[in-house]
Amino acid sequence: MTSLWQARRDAAPESASTLPASDFEDGARYDVVVVGAGLTGLVTALLLVRAGKKVALLEAGAVGSLTTGLSTAKVSLLQGTMYSRLSGETAMKNARAYVAANQEGAAWLLRYLDEHRVAYEVRDAYTYAGTPDGTAAVDEEQLAAARLGLPVEKVVLDLPFPTFGAVRLPDQAQIDPIAALDVMAMDFRARGGTLVEGARVLRVSATGGENRGDARVISTLGQIDAHRVVLATGTPILDRGLYFAKLEPVRSYGISYRLPGDRTGIDGMYVSADAPTRSLRTTPIVEGDGFGRIDGELLIVGGNGHTVGRAPHPAALVDDLEEWTAANFPGAERTHAWSAQDYVGANPIPFAGWLPRSAGRIYFATGYAKWGMTNAVASGLRIATELLGSDTWWAKTIGRRATRPQSIVRGAVNGANVGREAVEGWMGALRSTLPKDPPAEGQGVVAHDKGRPVGVCTVGGVTRTVSAVCPHLGGVLTWNDQETSWDCPLHGSRFTADGTRIEGPATADLA
Ligand SMILES: Cc1cc2nc3c(=O)[nH]c(=O)nc-3n(C[C@H](O)[C@H](O)[C@H](O)COP(=O)(O)OP(=O)(O)OC[C@H]3O[C@@H](n4cnc5c(N)ncnc54)[C@H](O)[C@@H]3O)c2cc1C
Ligand code: FES
């Protein structure tokens, strides 16, 4: 589904997608190949090309086609209840390093947007209690954030829906993530970087012979070699280090609305501390929205997240968000609806660095827990700095952190849930027989055909049958009735109705 940001790009006369495409040169050699043109990949690639490296950036879809282009895009140091989590799960010095990394990420991004005249809005950020039970979590967050030196204060909000206390951090920002990526993509190409869209990386292997110590990147367009490879693919697409097992893929929903009078009545960026999650921000109406030149703003409402592949009816979660908005913002008219996923690590601090068992050839970054606007930039800064032979104190501190019992328990619970889903998926498929009639439009079912799980769905009047076994590690897929996709409840790989891979650790399509 297309986000408001992607729709604006489609309506704009000039964007990254209209830049002359770089050619994929089969057999070429680069200093660094970066895989994935989201925020992590573009920041990393840009920093390296600016330092004089020969860099190729390979993107399976288009620039920003996944999480970054579907983000709510608040650039905020107040991040829900992140500091309460950090206080419980990591040492104070690591929490301070996390804050420093995010401060540097935010400062770098906003400075870059200023330099390239990309508009954004400075707004106060709030974490609020949506129920009386959430008040304690807000109080705890205020204390945890203040202990880390952030200028937070407790406030009482006057919003169109009930709140039960809030913490405020002034002067954060909200951006258009596609506008940010597009300017970075143009900058990267203008500096001689090779950016190829539509190149899905399938494998990375070690090279031998005179280029021993390099890595070979095998993609759908051919293969190229590099001294170092950076996987900026959301979750890593290689299983070394088993990072897919240390991450929970979480999908959530975003909807933009036009309101009567083109005023939203809110002037900050809000996220609830308690369930059900609600995230709100505004964005100025622009020419590309199709309403003409209007001095007004749209409202963006997000929330209702869940582990990928484990919500029985994602469409019902979108209906629920719509009902909540209609009740609290009367007259709101939906302009766009979309969804995306991000990866929540067992450890609260994102992973960024070299991939185990890659002999230092392959780097990766993941685990931003839906706060990647700052964390992705920090990861890009960290990896690029390391590849250029330098370091920062916060990167060194984070790199040496130990995993605490609370994070180990979180990881174990995640692992147990994955194990249960794996068994239940296979049992459920083997218990179900293929339907006599095709599923209704927009619906899909999993059943067995001679003992193998298959998925049958009808989309756009076409009924298709695909293998319902995830090519990553054999999870049985579930049907996503909101996005008409096959989703894996184990580690979050997703596929279109015809079996084409969309995202996640799998690199192959469905049979
Ligand atoms: C609904 C939602 C709202 C959010 N809101 C906020 C927010 O308000 N503030 C905030 O700070 N963070 C937010 N986040 C988190 C933030 O958007 C992400 O953490 C961040 O965008 C991740 O960037 P990325 O570059 O790692 O991943 P992506 O943007 O997903 O980029 C990865 C890229 O890699 C490509 N790729 C994958 N596999 C391959 C392959 N095999 N070969 C080639 N290319 C490949 C993909 O096509 C993709 O373009 C939100 C997340 C979600 C899901
Ligand atoms: S994503 Fe790992 S088994 Fe499907």
Image (cartoon, helix red, strand yellow):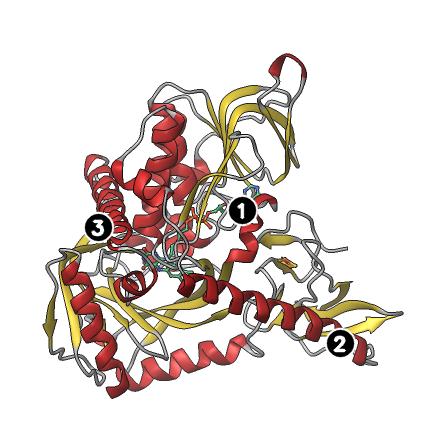
Quarter holding residue 189: top left
Looking at the image, is mark 1 or mark 3 earlier in the sequence?
Answer: 3
First in sequence: mark 2 vs mark 3 = 3
Kindly identify which residue carries mark 1: 236
The alpha-carbon separation of the residues under discs 2 and 3 comes to 50 Å
10 Å crowding of disc 1: few (<14), some (14-19), many (20+): many
> Which residue is disc 3 drawn over?
120
As drawn, is 4 to the left or to the right of 427?
Answer: left
Q: Three-letter amino acid code at disc 1?
A: Pro
Report the front residue among 104 and 339. 104
**Residue 319, position in %: x, y?**
45, 80
- From what the image shows, is residue 454 above or below residue 98? below
* Mark 1 or mark 2, earlier in chain: 1
Q: Residue flagged by tag 3: what amino acid is it? A: Tyr
Reply above or below: 218 against 234.
Answer: above
**Which label lies toward us, 2 or 3?**
2
Q: Residue at x 66, y 75 (%)?
A: 443
Q: Secondary structure at mark 1?
A: loop
Q: Are marks 1 and 3 in contact (CB under 8 Å)?
A: no
Going by the numbered disc 2, the residue's amino acid type is: Met
In what quadrant does ligand 2 lie? bottom right
User: x, y percentage for residue 54?
Assistant: 45, 20
| Classed neighbour count for the residue bearing mark 3: other residues with Cα under 10 Å, few (<14), some (14–19), many (≥20) | some
Residue 462 is situated, as x and y percent measured from the top left of the image, at 73, 66
The residue that label 2 is drawn on is: 427
Q: Secondary structure at mark 3?
A: loop
